[in-house]
Image (cartoon, rainbow, N blue to C red):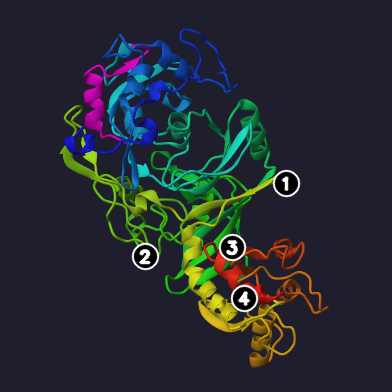
Amino acid sequence: MSEAGQKRAVSPAAADKSPADFPKTRAPRGTKKLRDDHGFKVKQQTIDKDVLSSTANPQKTIHEEETEGASYVIDGPLRRTTPYYFTYLTYCKQRWRDRKILDVFLDEFREKDGDIYRKAIASGQVTINKKPTTIDSIVRNGDLISHRCHRHEPAVSLRPIKIVFEDENVIAIDKPSGIPVHPTGRYRYNTITKIFQHEYGKTVHPCNRLDRLTLGLMFLGKNAKGADYFVKQIRERNVRKEYIARVKGKFPVEPLLIYQPLYTASPKHALNVVDHEKGKPAVTEFKRVSYDPSTDTSIVKCHPLTGRTHQIRVHLQYVGHPIANDPIYSSAFVWGSDDLGKGNEGCSEDVIARLDKIGKEKACSTWFHPEEDGEVLSKECCPECEMPFYTDPGPNDLDLWLHAYKYEASDKLWSYTADYPDWAINPHRKFMELAIEQARKCGETQTQFNVGAVLVLDGEILATGHSRELPGNTHAEQCALEKYFKEHNTTDVPKGTELFTTMEPCSFRLSGNLPCVDRVLNTSIKTCFVGVLEPDTFVKNNTGKAKLEEADVEYIHIPGYEDECLEIATFGHEKKD
């Protein structure tokens, strides 16, 4: 490791420890125990690594060599690991049978080029059934393939892993973007499960799948009972999933239901496409939440009815609204044109060839972030293994505007949601701040409450309102709606209109007037942004949020304004005896 790298501050949780210092939950060495102390199944490769010796250090097992060499390093916004020796162990897969070992490596793994694999085979770093190989060695059914290499894991985001819920069986987290869930490809210790193991001292197994770049709700089993419960429900499709995406362009106001079969065109690149001949059925429902003309992006709620790889991403690309910063499906370079693969079926070899250059000789670029300022192979090589270093990842390597927002059991016995991410909230803050300005116009009141509201369509303000602006005991939402109705001689607002209100719309009026929730439900409004939930001290057991959600109105809390909204709402109440 370079001198500069050695001076980086080590994570406090790992400063005095290597991963080997934490409690082990794997089967004892030399045994064939199939489950660990938490009831999780133990892979045969895991058992093998506790038994087999390193080819270069026979006095150590493979597991000992790996864990003693790796530690976490915190470097600004990035989490790194120190380089370490890693032995890749796997048993022959069906598609590898009766093929040359070199061909398997070249077809399955894009991390290294052919010369690196040839050199590894020639130097004895690759074995089959613990015996050295040649480039012409044939892989047979049941063979154990081993490849020892000096590993340089890519850096990942240091964003915190938020705990949404935890009990004795399961942990629900809000996973940051850019971190893989479990060891895969070039990642091992920079993964959710390994971070939990080595920094939190907890052994967890993922219950649902999220891609490395996808953020949001994930369920981690703390034991086999907890994991099996969630996995069974998801496998049997007893769970409704909702995602939030930020996409290119002005998404249609009407809901879209996309039926397009998907096919993995290149497993090595995780490239998936619509393909009516080879694809498997895939169905996704989309609903627009909002549109921001200043960035020409839309927030869209996505409901996958099937579970194909990259399903949401490919279906959005197909209809011409790819996720705005998608490194694959919104890259003009990869797809060879500015239409970004809209309506595309199948995949040409040229697309795969261009995608193969990304992260190696060419940094990723996307529609929203066209700058090529991300990871590529550098000219500097590691003195230990002579492999070229990668440059640091950039925004397109660490972020994807796709968020696992809600998971709910079909029988409604449980439901979990994660907060809306900043990239879905920030474009709307200016309208919430305008609603707060409206609330300030209410003035003092010793018994009533001060609320502001704004109606917005495609970034344009349709109407504003504040409590008691119109004659009578009128509420803010009521005033904004009635002003718009009067000006346009109508009884409804255009489809796609968004409501911003400093406080949750009321569901009950002591005066006998129509509650604001019912006024909203009588219109075409399908998105409601609020600054704060209405406390019980205002209206007891206000059910505004529940009624809106039951009517399929998207209810979104914009955080950061709670204290201000409540202070304005009760301005003057302190003078009441």
- The disc, 2 or 3, on the residue closer to the chain's N-terminal end is 2
Q: Where residue 275 sits: x, y (%)? A: 51, 50
Q: Which mark is residue 366?
A: none
Q: Which mark is residue 557?
A: 3
Q: Is residue 296 left or right of residue 469?
A: left
- The disc, 2 or 1, on the residue closer to the chain's N-terminal end is 2
Q: Which mark is residue 410?
A: 1
Q: Nearer the viewer, mark 4 or mark 2?
A: 4
Amino acid type assigned to the residue bearing label 3 in the image? His
- SS at mark 2? loop
* Residue holding disc 2: 338
Q: Where residue 274 sits: x, y (%)? A: 50, 52
* Residue holding disc 4: 571
Q: Circle 3: is it few (<14), some (14-19), or many (20+) Cα within 10 Å?
A: many
Q: Mark 1 and 4 residues: CB-CB less than 8 Å, in contact?
A: no
Q: Circle 1: is it few (<14), some (14-19), or many (20+) Cα within 10 Å?
A: few
Q: Circle 4: is it few (<14), some (14-19), or many (20+) Cα within 10 Å?
A: some
Q: Is residue 202 left or right of residue 494?
A: left
Amino acid type assigned to the residue bearing label 1 in the image? Ser
Q: Is residue 299 left or right of residue 66?
A: right
Amino acid type assigned to the residue bearing label 4 in the image? Phe
Q: Mark 4 and 2 residues: CB-CB less than 8 Å, in contact?
A: no
Q: Is residue 5 magenta?
A: no
- SS at mark 1? loop
Q: Is residue 318 visible?
A: no
Question: Residues in magenta?
Answer: 111-130
Residue located at (45% from left, 28% from top): 95
- SS at mark 4? loop
